[in-house]
Amino acid sequence: MRRRARLGVLVLLGGLVSLPALARASQYGNSPVAVGLAAEGAQAQLLVRRCIESAARVHRLPPAMLLILLQVEDGRLGRVSDNSNATVDIGPMQVNEIWLPKVAAHWGVSVPETFVTLRDSLCANLEGGAWILRQGIDEARGDFWQGVGFYHSHSPDHKADYLRKVLRQALRLEAEAGHPVATTTLAAGN
Protein backbone atom coordinates (compact mmCIF):
# COMPACT_ATOMS: atom_id res chain seq x y z
CA MET A 1 0.00 0.00 0.00
CA ARG A 2 2.80 2.39 0.87
CA ARG A 3 4.42 1.87 -2.55
CA ARG A 4 1.12 2.57 -4.31
CA ALA A 5 0.66 5.73 -2.27
CA ARG A 6 4.10 7.04 -3.27
CA LEU A 7 3.54 6.16 -6.91
CA GLY A 8 0.15 7.92 -6.64
CA VAL A 9 1.95 11.05 -5.45
CA LEU A 10 4.24 10.86 -8.46
CA VAL A 11 1.25 10.52 -10.75
CA LEU A 12 -0.30 13.61 -9.17
CA LEU A 13 3.01 15.51 -9.40
CA GLY A 14 3.50 15.07 -13.07
CA GLY A 15 1.16 12.55 -14.53
CA LEU A 16 2.75 9.32 -15.65
CA VAL A 17 2.29 8.74 -19.32
CA SER A 18 0.40 5.50 -19.70
CA LEU A 19 2.56 3.03 -21.53
CA PRO A 20 1.58 -0.45 -22.69
CA ALA A 21 4.32 -1.89 -20.49
CA LEU A 22 6.94 -0.33 -18.29
CA ALA A 23 10.28 -0.12 -20.00
CA ARG A 24 13.05 -1.96 -18.25
CA ALA A 25 15.63 0.40 -16.84
CA SER A 26 18.34 -1.60 -18.60
CA GLN A 27 16.90 -0.46 -21.94
CA TYR A 28 17.58 3.21 -21.24
CA GLY A 29 15.70 4.22 -24.32
CA ASN A 30 13.79 7.30 -25.29
CA SER A 31 10.06 7.18 -24.69
CA PRO A 32 8.29 4.88 -27.16
CA VAL A 33 5.43 7.39 -27.32
CA ALA A 34 5.48 11.13 -27.76
CA VAL A 35 5.85 12.74 -24.33
CA GLY A 36 5.07 16.35 -23.68
CA LEU A 37 3.10 18.67 -21.50
CA ALA A 38 -0.61 18.28 -21.98
CA ALA A 39 -0.99 22.01 -21.40
CA GLU A 40 0.20 24.68 -23.82
CA GLY A 41 1.44 28.24 -23.51
CA ALA A 42 0.61 29.93 -20.23
CA GLN A 43 -0.82 26.71 -18.78
CA ALA A 44 2.42 24.84 -19.51
CA GLN A 45 4.46 27.64 -17.95
CA LEU A 46 2.27 27.53 -14.86
CA LEU A 47 2.73 23.75 -14.59
CA VAL A 48 6.51 24.05 -14.89
CA ARG A 49 6.54 26.84 -12.30
CA ARG A 50 4.44 24.80 -9.87
CA CYS A 51 6.68 21.75 -10.34
CA ILE A 52 9.81 23.82 -9.70
CA GLU A 53 8.31 25.55 -6.66
CA SER A 54 7.06 22.28 -5.19
CA ALA A 55 10.39 20.49 -5.61
CA ALA A 56 12.26 23.50 -4.22
CA ARG A 57 9.99 23.74 -1.19
CA VAL A 58 10.18 20.03 -0.38
CA HIS A 59 13.98 19.96 -0.61
CA ARG A 60 14.66 23.42 0.86
CA LEU A 61 16.22 24.82 -2.30
CA PRO A 62 15.90 28.16 -4.09
CA PRO A 63 13.53 27.74 -7.05
CA ALA A 64 15.88 29.91 -9.16
CA MET A 65 18.62 27.30 -8.81
CA LEU A 66 16.35 24.55 -10.11
CA LEU A 67 15.44 26.74 -13.08
CA ILE A 68 19.12 27.42 -13.74
CA LEU A 69 20.04 23.73 -13.52
CA LEU A 70 17.11 22.83 -15.76
CA GLN A 71 18.48 25.19 -18.40
CA VAL A 72 22.11 24.15 -17.95
CA GLU A 73 21.20 20.47 -18.22
CA ASP A 74 19.03 21.16 -21.30
CA GLY A 75 17.33 17.76 -21.19
CA ARG A 76 13.95 16.96 -22.69
CA LEU A 77 10.90 15.13 -21.46
CA GLY A 78 10.90 11.59 -22.83
CA ARG A 79 14.57 11.71 -23.82
CA VAL A 80 17.55 9.68 -22.65
CA SER A 81 20.97 11.13 -23.51
CA ASP A 82 24.20 9.17 -23.88
CA ASN A 83 27.29 10.32 -22.00
CA SER A 84 30.94 9.85 -22.93
CA ASN A 85 31.44 7.73 -19.78
CA ALA A 86 28.99 5.03 -21.02
CA THR A 87 26.15 6.20 -18.77
CA VAL A 88 22.93 7.96 -19.73
CA ASP A 89 21.11 11.01 -18.44
CA ILE A 90 17.33 10.94 -18.11
CA GLY A 91 14.78 13.68 -18.82
CA PRO A 92 14.83 17.45 -18.31
CA MET A 93 17.15 17.51 -15.25
CA GLN A 94 19.41 14.93 -16.92
CA VAL A 95 19.35 12.60 -13.92
CA ASN A 96 22.23 10.17 -14.39
CA GLU A 97 21.35 6.47 -14.43
CA ILE A 98 23.68 5.84 -11.47
CA TRP A 99 21.02 7.54 -9.32
CA LEU A 100 18.22 5.15 -10.34
CA PRO A 101 18.53 2.75 -7.36
CA LYS A 102 18.77 5.60 -4.83
CA VAL A 103 15.87 7.58 -6.30
CA ALA A 104 13.82 4.36 -6.50
CA ALA A 105 14.49 3.73 -2.80
CA HIS A 106 13.64 7.37 -2.00
CA TRP A 107 10.32 7.05 -3.84
CA GLY A 108 9.64 3.50 -2.66
CA VAL A 109 9.14 2.14 -6.18
CA SER A 110 11.09 -0.15 -8.50
CA VAL A 111 14.05 0.91 -10.61
CA PRO A 112 12.10 0.37 -13.87
CA GLU A 113 9.21 2.52 -12.58
CA THR A 114 11.72 5.16 -11.51
CA PHE A 115 13.37 5.19 -14.93
CA VAL A 116 10.08 5.62 -16.81
CA THR A 117 8.83 8.24 -14.36
CA LEU A 118 12.04 10.28 -14.51
CA ARG A 119 11.99 10.08 -18.29
CA ASP A 120 8.32 10.87 -18.86
CA SER A 121 7.11 13.03 -15.95
CA LEU A 122 8.31 16.61 -15.69
CA CYS A 123 7.38 17.13 -12.05
CA ALA A 124 8.84 13.79 -10.99
CA ASN A 125 12.05 14.52 -12.90
CA LEU A 126 12.31 17.91 -11.17
CA GLU A 127 11.63 16.30 -7.79
CA GLY A 128 14.28 13.66 -8.43
CA GLY A 129 16.80 16.26 -9.55
CA ALA A 130 16.03 18.47 -6.53
CA TRP A 131 16.45 15.48 -4.22
CA ILE A 132 19.84 14.71 -5.81
CA LEU A 133 20.88 18.35 -5.45
CA ARG A 134 19.86 18.26 -1.77
CA GLN A 135 21.97 15.09 -1.34
CA GLY A 136 24.95 16.96 -2.81
CA ILE A 137 24.49 19.98 -0.54
CA ASP A 138 24.11 17.72 2.48
CA GLU A 139 27.21 15.76 1.46
CA ALA A 140 29.07 19.09 1.19
CA ARG A 141 27.95 19.83 4.78
CA GLY A 142 25.79 22.72 3.68
CA ASP A 143 28.27 24.28 1.24
CA PHE A 144 25.73 25.30 -1.36
CA TRP A 145 28.08 25.76 -4.31
CA GLN A 146 30.05 22.61 -3.57
CA GLY A 147 26.70 20.78 -3.53
CA VAL A 148 25.69 22.32 -6.85
CA GLY A 149 28.98 21.11 -8.28
CA PHE A 150 28.32 17.64 -6.84
CA TYR A 151 25.03 17.56 -8.78
CA HIS A 152 27.18 17.12 -11.86
CA SER A 153 30.41 15.49 -10.70
CA HIS A 154 32.82 14.95 -7.84
CA SER A 155 35.77 15.42 -10.21
CA PRO A 156 37.32 18.84 -9.43
CA ASP A 157 37.76 19.71 -13.12
CA HIS A 158 34.24 18.64 -14.17
CA LYS A 159 32.73 20.31 -11.12
CA ALA A 160 34.53 23.62 -11.83
CA ASP A 161 33.44 23.54 -15.48
CA TYR A 162 29.84 22.86 -14.42
CA LEU A 163 29.84 25.71 -11.90
CA ARG A 164 31.07 28.06 -14.65
CA LYS A 165 28.09 26.96 -16.78
CA VAL A 166 25.75 27.56 -13.85
CA LEU A 167 27.21 31.05 -13.32
CA ARG A 168 26.89 31.90 -17.03
CA GLN A 169 23.26 30.78 -16.98
CA ALA A 170 22.54 32.81 -13.82
CA LEU A 171 24.10 35.90 -15.39
CA ARG A 172 22.10 35.37 -18.59
CA LEU A 173 18.87 35.13 -16.62
CA GLU A 174 19.86 38.18 -14.59
CA ALA A 175 20.37 40.18 -17.80
CA GLU A 176 17.03 39.00 -19.20
CA ALA A 177 15.22 39.88 -15.98
CA GLY A 178 16.84 43.31 -15.81
CA HIS A 179 17.73 42.95 -12.13
CA PRO A 180 20.48 41.18 -10.20
CA VAL A 181 20.16 37.55 -9.17
CA ALA A 182 22.54 37.67 -6.23
CA THR A 183 24.43 34.46 -5.52
CA THR A 184 23.58 34.86 -1.83
CA THR A 185 19.89 34.77 -2.82
CA LEU A 186 20.43 31.53 -4.74
CA ALA A 187 22.22 29.95 -1.79
CA ALA A 188 19.61 31.13 0.73
CA GLY A 189 17.36 28.16 0.06
CA ASN A 190 19.57 25.66 1.88
Image: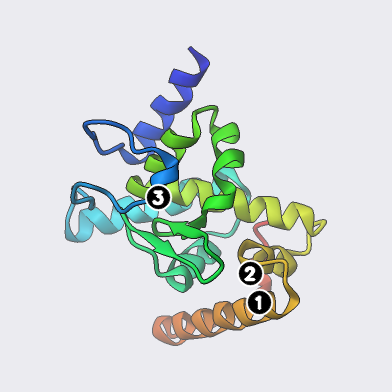
Amino acid of disc 1? His
Task: Please identify, in this view, whether the residue under mark 1 or under mark 2 is nearer the observer.
Answer: 1
Lower sequence index among marks 2 and 3:
3
Residue 145 percent coordinates (x, y): 71, 70
Q: Residue at x 71, y 63 (%)?
A: 147
Asked which secondary structure carries label 1, the reply is helix
Residue 131 percent coordinates (x, y): 59, 47
Task: Please identify, in this view, whether the residue under mark 1 or under mark 3 is nearer the observer.
Answer: 3
Lower sequence index among marks 1 and 3:
3
In the rendered image, the quadrant that contains the C terminus is: bottom right
Q: Which residue is mark 3?
A: 28
Residue 67 percent coordinates (x, y): 46, 65
Q: In the displayed structure, does residue 161 sit left or right of residue 47?
A: right
Q: Which residue is mark 2?
A: 185
Lower sequence index among marks 1 and 2:
1
Residue at the extreme top of the image, as rendered: 1
What crowding class fits label 1: few (fewer than 14 Cα within 10 Å), some (14-19), or many (20 or more)?
some
Q: Which mark is residue 158?
A: 1
Callout count: 3
Q: Residue at x 47, y 73 (%)?
A: 72
What crowding class fits label 3: few (fewer than 14 Cα within 10 Å), some (14-19), or many (20 or more)?
many
Amino acid of disc 3? Tyr
Asked which secondary structure carries label 2, the reply is helix
Q: Residue at x 31, y 50 (%)?
A: 47
Q: Are marks 1 and 3 in contact (CB under 8 Å)?
A: no
Q: CA distance from mark 1 to mark 2?
A: 24 Å
Residue 110 percent coordinates (x, y): 49, 30
Q: Nearer the viewer, residue 178 or 46?
A: 46
